[in-house]
Every structure is written in C-alpha cells, then in structure tokens.
Amino acid sequence: MSRVCQALILIALSLGSKLVAQQPPATAKVEVSPNYVLGPNDVISIKVFDEPELDTTLRIPEEGAVNFPLIGEITLHGKNVQQAAKLIRDRLAERYLVNPQVNVMVMEATKHLVTVLGQVQRPGTYRFPDRDALNLIQVIGIAGGYTRLADSSHVTVKRLIKQKETVFKLNAKKMASEQSSKAFEIMPGDIVIIGERIF
C-alpha cells in the first residue's frame, strides 16, 4: 500500500473518531460538582477517551454494583464522581489499557431530592444541595417556612432504608428553640410533612 493511501486512511479514521466524539449524548447532562456522591437510581454516562466501544450509560441499582465492559462488576454507590472515574481508570489500567482517560457524567440525579409537604408556604420537591448537609429547620426554611396553621411540634419524616419505609416523629419547635436540642439531619429522598394545628 502506498504512503498516500496510508495517509488517506489515517485522515479518514481521524475524521471518523472526531465525528463520533462530537455526537451529542442521548440525554442532557446534569451539572454537578466532582464531589457529587453517586447513589441508587442515578443515571451516569461513562466515557473512555479514544475507546468509543467502552462508552456506557447506565442506572445505578439499589445494591450499587454495575457491570462495565472488560472489568465486570464494580461498586459506584457512595463514591463521588471523581472517585468513580479513578476506580474505573485504575481497573482498566491494571490489565487492559495504557493510561486510560475516563470521564463520568451524571445524566439524572434521581434520588437527590427532598420533598416538603403539609403546612409550609411552598410545598414541593427541592433538589438536595450538592454535598451540603441539611437539617430539618433548614429544609422548612427552603420551603418558605410555616403557614399560620402549622403545628411545628408535629413533624413527620419518611425515609426509605433498605427498601423499607421508616417514619420519624419530630418536634421542630423544640429543635428551633433549644440550642441543646440536636438538629435532625435530612437525607436525600426524604419526605417531610408538617402537621396542622387542631383548634
């Protein structure tokens, strides 16, 4: 084969790889920080530079382990975006690729929401601040505070723990008035219900 033919083939391959790289993802990327912690039901896209056959989009299951080409089962639940990318990169570098460049993107952050219902000014579902800790009083504030009918001493928090609903009965009035009272930490996926006063 002549050098010209070889050069043309190389150019065609180069253009082809660029076209593949420029194709838009099927779903829009969610803007999160590299410290965003992955959890069950999050949808992520994993891309390995110059290895399009390894590009994968998947949903993280409850148990947290996913199957990735070449390296098999890998646990991503509880790891942040940077840690997940490093784990995949290290596994690929062990036996398969030289200095692989791995990018992990969050396409859908399903579970990282908190819902506030009942006697608050703006009931609804709010995106959980990335990497921030939130307590019960702060969440009530995010939802606009209490209505005039609210009974802040009767607050319910519902939380799924290992697929089972756990219910916490809380006194937000006491938490807000007593500095010695420990604030109740709200977790992503929680449902907070503010009770109504009985006249």
Image (cartoon, rainbow, N blue to C red):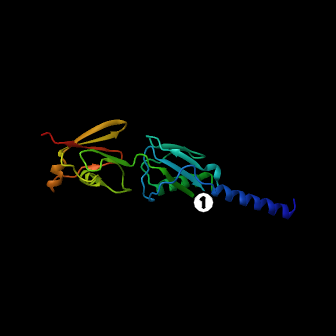
The quadrant holding residue 68 is top right
In the image, 96 versus 79, the foreground residue is 79
Query: Which residue is the extreme one toward the top?
Result: 164
Q: Residue 93 location, x and y as percent?
A: 59, 55
Residue at position x 64%, y 57% from top? 21
Say left or right for 110 vs 159.
right
Q: Relative to 34, does residue 75 appear above or below in the rendering? A: above
Q: Residue 77 location, x and y as percent?
A: 44, 47
Residue at position x 74%, y 58% from top? 13
Q: Residue 124 location, x and y as percent?
A: 33, 47
Residue at position x 61%, y 51% from top? 95
Say left or right for 197 vs 89.
left
The residue wearing badge 1 is 99
- Quadrant that contains the N terminus: bottom right
The quadrant holding residue 40 is top left
Q: Residue 99 location, x and y as percent?
A: 60, 60
Say left or right for 77 vs 169.
right
Q: Residues within 10 Å of mark 1 (few under 14, many from 20)?
A: few
Q: Secondary structure at mark 1?
A: loop
Could you tell me how many numbered marks the image carries?
Answer: 1
In the image, 130 versus 196, the foreground residue is 196
Q: Callout 1, which amino acid?
A: Asn
Residue at position x 80%, y 63% from top? 7
- Quadrant that contains the C terminus: top left
Query: Which residue is the extreme one toward the right?
Result: 2
In the image, 92 versus 39, the foreground residue is 39
